[in-house]
Amino acid sequence: TADAPSTIAQASLDAYLRLSHIPPKGHKNVKPTVEPLPLWRALQLYVGLTPKQRDAEMFKAIVARNAGRLRALVHVGVDVNCRNEYGQTCLFMAAWTGDLGCVEALLASGAAADLADNAGTLPSQCALRHGVVANGLEHLHPPTRFVELIPSASAHPGAGSGYFDNVFPDDFLARLDALHGTLPVAPKEKESCSNRSYFCDSLGWVLDGVRRACGRAVFPNMRFLHYTDVGGSLPAHVDLSRTDLQGVTSTKIFIIYLTTCASGGQTNLLTSTNAHDHNVLAAVQPRRGRLLIFPHLCPHEGAVVQHVPKLLLRGEMY
């Protein structure tokens, strides 16, 4: 049976780590012999003698769109997740340039699909404009799949509601954490179980992050909801829409959960707002990095908070 991609990657890395960082003396004077070679042997010529040279050969193979060369390099020993100065892996570069052959070769060799570049962008995100490549990454990076909670064809006002997991890089979430820590807490205008901090994304970095994650645009005005006490909850209700400066009205709510709650604190999507006859259609547990999206008119409630702190970012979506 064929080895698993992770096994292939580890064996290749072990061979790579045995390379000397200093080229052997006289290596420039070694003249290759001329002899007929099968294609596999030909692809293994001039693979580099040091880790740095081996990394360079990997990226040369990406530029040349040469999946066979990549497989040959993996065979002799490489770090399949080596990066360039921009923090981009070979898989990132192959996805970005739309090279399905190299993407498949790298994934089969154990390349990690969850390594972001210096800007926090994942290979699957930069591959969105290349449908074939994006689909190739999707089946090996299933956490980016949209989980539909209420079918789009349903007559329920919450039709199309659902969530994504693991679509935000860690540094994006950490930046949201840090931002929340700098914002003032708004005075409470009515009895509330959470503290609110308002944020306008005038620079657009949160808007860009959400757009990369799900392909949808959101309003720049958002708010953090911070639950610090156990026992808080929200009764069944629907949300009002908002209208931007150009007169365009929002259609959906988005929530980015910034903390994980092992139990309690769910966002429950309901059949109605009537407390006597509503049923829970879907209970969404807070999980760090989870992106929940549902229409304004979808009845919902906030279940009793059992673990604190509970922190989320909430806003409107076009």
Image: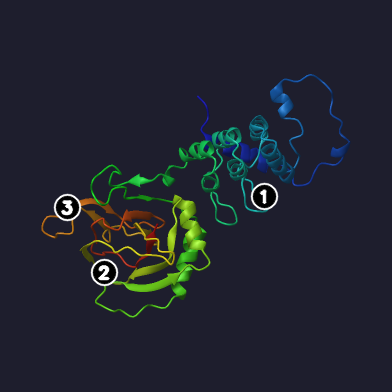
How far apart are labels 1 and 3 at the CA level? Answer: 52 Å
The residue tagged 3 is 279
Q: Are marks 3 and 2 in contact (CB under 8 Å)?
A: no
- Specify whether 170 is left or right of 318: right
Q: In the image, what residue occupies the spot 32% across and 60% down?
A: 261
Residue lying farthest left?
276
* Among numbered discs 3 and 2, the one appearing first in the sequence: 2
The residue tagged 1 is 84
Mark 1 is on which residue type?
A: Asn
The location of residue 75, given as percent across then percent down, is: 64, 32
Mark 2 is on which residue type?
A: Val
Residue lying farthest right?
29
Q: Looking at the image, which is closer to me, 156 or 9?
A: 156
- Specify whether 316 is left or right of 113: left
Q: Nearer the viewer, mark 1 or mark 3?
A: 3
The location of residue 104, given as percent across then percent down, is: 56, 34
Residue lying farthest front?
247
Q: Look at the numbered disc 3 and give the secondary structure of its residue.
A: loop
Q: Looking at the image, which is closer to me, 197 or 274?
A: 274
